[in-house]
């Protein structure tokens, strides 16, 4: 993985990562050394049961017949932010963070703009030093709460950000912080779901202003032609606490 090697000069190479199941995922042609295969159906089944799924050094095969059919999972990446964008595609809108990583590559992290992960990511970005070299580590941890005698299972999800080993707190905390609340709305199927649109639009307006001083990064459509380098065992050990179940934000390692 690009974050595990040293270097600072630009190489002209681009790496693309999506945030999936609490990890960074990228397309690959061949199985990385030391990685084990897991079935996508197994991941989805265990997630449906609200179980913890350890995807460190794991990959699955999409069997889609493309040149880069594998989806490989990585724990984290370190770099300096070059751009923060709201990117609109045919299939939706993404939050896109462009980094100059430790290998000198351009690494791009993407996630659903109006999802839970983006809400947490944007809130923490408001507290970072724009010029710092930062470590980004997605997380997704099983949790639950009681309401009206029912147990609601869910995943606490977001992106932990550390600056020189010190975690970055969310800028807005609690109900009285000024952050708009989430809303319960009906989707096109008439089912209730949580909407974060107002909350994320509020956060995005402030993040966009904060990072306006950075040079504009040209929009580039993600491809499957780059295979990221594999993380080192040292970094994998450092991620153990991020995969432990918890029910309170105060208990989380970020």
Image (cartoon, rainbow, N blue to C red):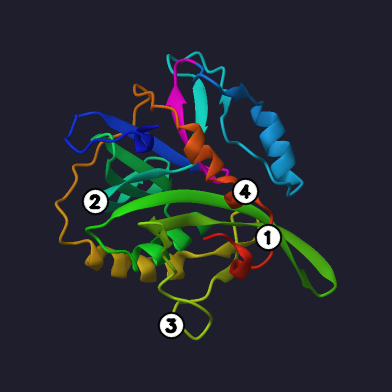
Against 37, is 217 above or below?
below
* Direction from residue 238 to residue 100 in the image, left or right: left
**Mark 3 and mark 4: span between their CA atoms?**
30 Å
Magenta span: 20-30
Q: Which mark is residue 243?
A: 4
Front tag of 1 and 2: 1
Task: Measure the alpha-carbon separation of dots 1 and 4.
Answer: 9 Å
- Residue 234 locus on image (x, y percent): 49, 37
Q: Name the mark on residue 83.
A: 2
Q: Quadrant of residue 100?
A: top left
The earlier-in-sequence mark between 3 and 2 is 2
Q: Could you tell me which secondary element the residue under label 3 belongs to?
A: loop
Residue 246 numbered tag: 1
Q: Is residue 94 magenta?
A: no
Report the residue at 19% width, 45% height from top.
Answer: 217
Between discs 2 and 4, the one toward the N terminus:
2
Mark seen at residue 178 = 3
| Mark 3 burial class by Cα count in 10 Å: few <14, some 14-19, many 20+ | few
How far apart are the alpha carbons under marks 3 and 2? 26 Å
Q: Position of residue 220 (x, y in %)?
A: 25, 36
């Amino acid at each position: 993985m690009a974050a595990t090697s040293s270097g600072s000069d630009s190489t002209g190479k681009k790496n693309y990562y999506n945030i999936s199941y609490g990890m960074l995922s990228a397309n690959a042609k061949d199985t990385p050394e030391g990685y084990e295969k897991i079935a996508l159906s197994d991941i989805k089944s265990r997630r449906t049961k609200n179980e913890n799924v350890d995807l460190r050094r794991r990959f699955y095969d999409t069997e889609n017949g493309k040149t880069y059919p594998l989806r490989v999972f990585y724990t984290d990446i370190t770099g300096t932010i070059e751009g923060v964008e709201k990117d609109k595609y045919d299939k939706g809108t993404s939050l896109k963070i462009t980094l100059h990583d430790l290998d000198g590559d351009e690494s791009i992290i993407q996630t659903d703009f109006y999802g839970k992960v983006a809400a947490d990511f944007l809130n923490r970005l408001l507290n970072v030093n724009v010029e710092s070299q930062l470590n980004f580590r997605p997380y997704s941890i099983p949790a639950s709460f009681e309401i009206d005698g029912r147990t609601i299972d869910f995943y606490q999800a977001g992106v932990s950000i550390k600056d020189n080993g010190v975690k970055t707190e969310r800028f807005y905390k609690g109900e009285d912080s000024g952050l708009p609340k989430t809303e319960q709305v009906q989707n096109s199927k008439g089912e209730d779901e949580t909407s974060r649109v107002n909350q994320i639009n509020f956060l995005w307006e402030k993040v966009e202003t904060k990072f306006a001083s950075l040079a504009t990064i040209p929009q580039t459509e993600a491809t499957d032609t780059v295979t990221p380098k594999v993380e080192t065992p040292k970094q994998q050990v450092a991620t153990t606490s991020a995969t432990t179940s918890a029910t309170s934000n105060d208990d989380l390692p970020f």
